[in-house]
Image (cartoon, rainbow, N blue to C red):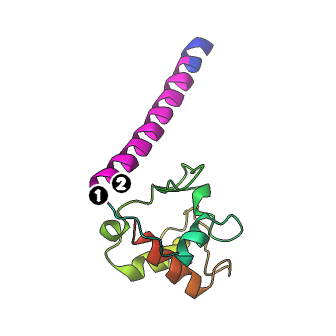
Amino acid sequence: MNTNYSELVSAGRTRVACARAATVMMLSLLTFSAGAAADDTPMPGKALVTERSKGNCLACHVIEEGPLPGNLGPPLVLMKVRFPNREELLHQIYDASSKDRHSRMPPFGRHGILTTQEIEQIVDYLYTL
């Protein structure tokens, strides 16, 4: 019986590793196919997304330019398509638990981790992804 359980655990880990690799490959292909022009304008939202003491989005999400991305949340790609209503994305970051009480996403605005202005800056940046 232990052998079967070990085989199941191993197969599950293999599936997770394949899903991670597929996500990274998808992000690479989307970036390449979009042909996005490099913009040297610094975006305050980008710094907040990658900063560990503030947004720390990389702890849970894959982001195109992010080092050491997490895998708990969905990849942050095609954000304008996924959230065509800007207010919905603002509310998601402000307090995801207001929509889903089981959300693992911290209520950044409600807990005062981020200001409303910082959340606006993050959404501005996410809309470039």
- Please give the residue where the numbered disc 1 appears in the rendered image: 34
**Residue found 35% across the figure and 71% down from its top:** 83
Q: Give the range drawn in magenta.
A: 7-35
Identify the secondary structure beneath mark 2: helix
Task: Name the quadrant of the C terminus.
Answer: bottom left
Task: Give residue 126's quadrant in the image.
Answer: bottom left
Residue 64 visible? The answer is yes
Point 57% across, 20% down: residue: 5
Residue 47, relative to residue 18: is it above or below?
Answer: below
- The crowd level at tag 1 (other Cα within 10 Å; few <14, some 14-19, many 20+) is few
Please count the marks in the image.
2
Tell me what residue is drawn at x 50 percent, y 29 percent: 12
Query: Which percent across, then down, holds residue 75?
Result: 45, 55
Residue type (three-letter) at the residue carrying disc 1: Ala
Q: Tell me if label 2 and label 1 are in contact, CB under 8 Å.
A: yes
Tell me residue 20's x, y (percent): 47, 40
Q: In which quarter of the image is residue 76?
A: bottom left
Q: Mark 2 points at which residue?
A: 31
The amino acid at mark 2 is: Thr
* Viewer-proximal residue among 11 and 100: 11
C-alpha gap between disc 2 and disc 1: 5 Å
**Residue 31 painted magenta:** yes
From the viewer's perspective, is 33 left or right of 19? left
